[in-house]
Image (cartoon, coloured by chain):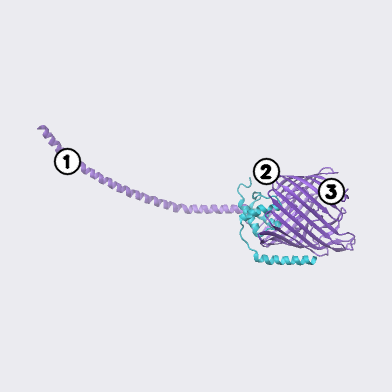
Chain colours: A purple, B cyan
Amino acid sequence: MRKMTLGITLSIILSPMSFASSSEINELKNEVLLLKQMMKELKKSNDELRAYQNTTAKDSFVPASRNAFSRLEASVEELKTNLEGNEKSGFQLAGYASFGWQDAQNNDNEFDLVQFSPIFHYQYGSMFQFEGELEVKVGADGDTEIDLEYAAGNIFLNDYVGLIVGKFMSPIGQFVQNGHPSWINKMPSTPLGFGHDGAAPTSNIGIELRGGLPKFANTRSNYAIFVSNAPVFGIATDGDTIIDASGKTSSNDVSKTWGGRFAVNPISGMEVGVSMASGDIAEELAGGKKIARDYEVVGFDGAYHYDNFMLKGEYIKQKVGENDLSMLEGGIWRAWYSQLSYQFQGLNLEPVIRYGDYNNPEIKRKQLALGLNYLFSNNVIAKLAYENNKDKDGNAVNSKANDNRLLAQFAFGF
Amino acid sequence: MKKIMRLTILLAMFLTFSVNYVFANEHKGDSVRGAELWASSCVHCHNIREPADLSKRAWKYSMNHMRVRAGFTGQETRDILAFILESKTSKDSE
């Protein structure tokens, strides 16, 4: 009985508790659902807030960044302008220099060459350029000798025509106009007949048109045509009869020289040119009277570069006509040379061989030269060469024409 | 001979001006064509000068000088210059 009473009592007591627990669970469930809903809303709010913050931050950051970037760009552009130059007119100093030594037969060895050749360039836009080259040398007696090699204004009329006025290098052939700078010439000496007062004209004073031509049959070509004051014929201080074909500012009362050169590049690495000139050459007679003699020039030149080989050759002939009033005989001044070189690029060594021949009415000379160059860089070169010289008439005993020579030279271009 | 030479040169001058007036045109440099010309033309006369050898400013003057010396057209000059300027780097002076 007591057990039964206890059971009933417990049932009565526990029954409401069980009921209450189920309701709480439901309440809890509702609360959880509510919380979930709140979490969702909170997350949504949070996302919206973040999105807003991001948008706000971007809107406030980008203009500042853009401004800074623009300023940076402007600074870089200004720096580039200062460094690279964008001025319409400007000036540049270029040129070359060389120092030489020789040991010739029948002579003591000597440091025989100190030469500095500054080249001045002034440019105005893409339409005009002035260029002038001085040749500054120390003579045997220590005096400084200065020559104006050329000084000319180049007006670029269009892509194919440059009008040149002033003193310009003779466009006859290649060596005189392009090969003479010591850092370009692969030998320490000039080929026979291609120096001053030789077979090749050196410079002209007058007007020249030159440039490249439009491609024809996929072949490049270039030209030069000129009219200039005439050269002078006479006897030099050493007694030789010479053609002084360097530019003069006087017409010497004779007709002008007309001439030019045309060259084509038939294949890559090759250029072949032909040159001609014609006019009068002036001669001053003993009494001061000036006379005119016929003057003609013909030249052929070629250059071919293949792999590390470089083959060059050139032929030039100047012909002076006769004049009965003169005691001097006219005749032909003719010179040619051929040169082959090869660059061992890993070793920076360049062996060179050159053969040349020079004839005029008084002399007949031949020369075989062997050289070896060391290239510190492409424009800084040490040269060593041996020349075997022959005067075929054997009348050059007192000159140095028969003397074989060992030559060394240090040359650089800048 | 003299008259023939003079007439030839006068005719050449006339043709040069008239033909070039028709063909003359200025375009920007093409560095690909410039690279080919740089490699094949400069060596006719001298060892190739690397783009690093001179400043950009100096190259502009030097290429005009070479336009006269080598007989380049204006376009060929701009092509070579474009190649050289594009080839220069900030380490050129090292």
Residue A293 as seen in the image, left or right of residue A51: right
Q: Does label 1 lie on the same chain as label 2?
A: yes
Q: Secondary structure at mark 1?
A: helix
Residue B34 drawn at (x, y percent): 63, 55
Q: Which residue is mark 3?
A: A390
Q: Secondary structure at mark 3?
A: strand
**Which of the chains bears the disc numbered 2?**
A
Residue A385 drawn at (x, y percent): 77, 45
- Marks 2 and 1 sit apart, C-alpha to C-alpha, by 106 Å
**Which of the chains bears the disc numbered 3?**
A
Q: Which residue is mark 2?
A: A346
Q: Which numbered mark, 1 or 3, is in the foreground of this view?
A: 3
Residue closer to the observer: A55 or B41:
B41
Q: Which residue is mark 1?
A: A16
Can residue A389 be seen here? The reply is: yes
Give the farthest residue toward the left. A1
- Marks 3 and 2 sit apart, C-alpha to C-alpha, by 36 Å
